[in-house]
Image: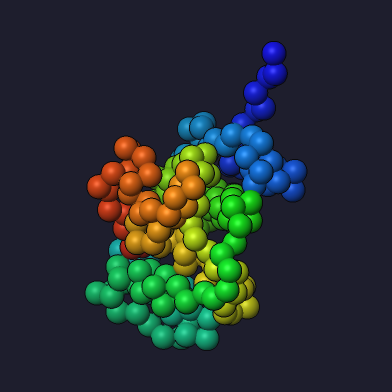
Amino acid sequence: MIQAPDPIIFGERALCIEDVLALANRQAPSALQGDAEFRARIARGAQFLDSLLNKEGVIYGVTTGYGDSCVVAVPLEHVEALPQHLYTFHGCGLGKLLDAQATRAVLAARLQSLCQGVSGVRVELLERLQAFIDQDVLPLIPEEGSVGASGDLTPLSYVAATLSGERDVMFRGERRPPATCTANWAGRRWCCAPRKRWR
């Protein structure tokens, strides 16, 4: 009898390239680190961001613009709308779509980065992103068209939009809206505003 592979755990432990390849090729399941301390660390990051927002603090990319626009203040009444504007504005990629393996690798890299607890996201975002990987819900990400020094704003805008239910995904060989992929997501609208932490 063939033994099922152990899940690759997203959390404090670093992923190695073999882990990413196994996920990209659907050779291993995935899971989030489940202990209370990990979840508490993620929660502390979100609480810290909330405390800065409550004090009207300056937070790069939340109450300011991005890149060279970091000197532009975003009024508090527009802070909630900024993330949606960002992923909509940067959703201008070109060329062929990334293949399934590359898309899974993108999701794995983003999830592992967010699991470090320094981005101010909530655990619900980590759970949703891990579910995308585990259930093979794949954002449609163009190969070309990124901007900025990081080079990932355009590709990740497609991930953010699908997490928010606004762009189609590939699921079981069909292009469809994310909310139709599983019963758990049906009819659920996801918000990426700062206080919801979908960024």
Quarter of the image that includes the C terminus = bottom left
- Residue 48, position in %: x, y? 42, 56
- Residue 127, position in %: x, y? 45, 42
Image colouring: rainbow
Q: Is residue 149 above or below residue 133?
A: below
Q: How many marks?
A: 0
Q: Residue at x 30, y 79 (%)?
A: 75
Q: Is residue 80 above or below residue 5?
A: below
Q: Residue at x 55, y 68 (%)?
A: 142
Quarter of the image that includes the N terminus = top right
Q: Residue at x 41, y 86 (%)?
A: 72
Q: Residue at x 62, y 40 (%)?
A: 26
Residue at the extreme top of the image, as rendered: 1
Q: Is residue 94 above or below residue 182?
A: below
- Residue 77, position in %: x, y? 24, 74
Residue at the extreme front of the image, as rendered: 173
- In screen coordinates, is 80 left or right of 2? left
- Residue 189, position in %: x, y? 27, 53
Q: Quadrant location of residue 5?
A: top right
- In screen coordinates, is 1 left or right of 156? right
Residue nearest the observer in this picture, 87 or 76 = 87
Residue nearest the observer in this picture, 124 or 129 = 129
Residue 33 visible to an observer of this rendering: no
Residue 82 visible to an observer of this rendering: yes
Q: Is residue 3 above or below residue 112?
A: above
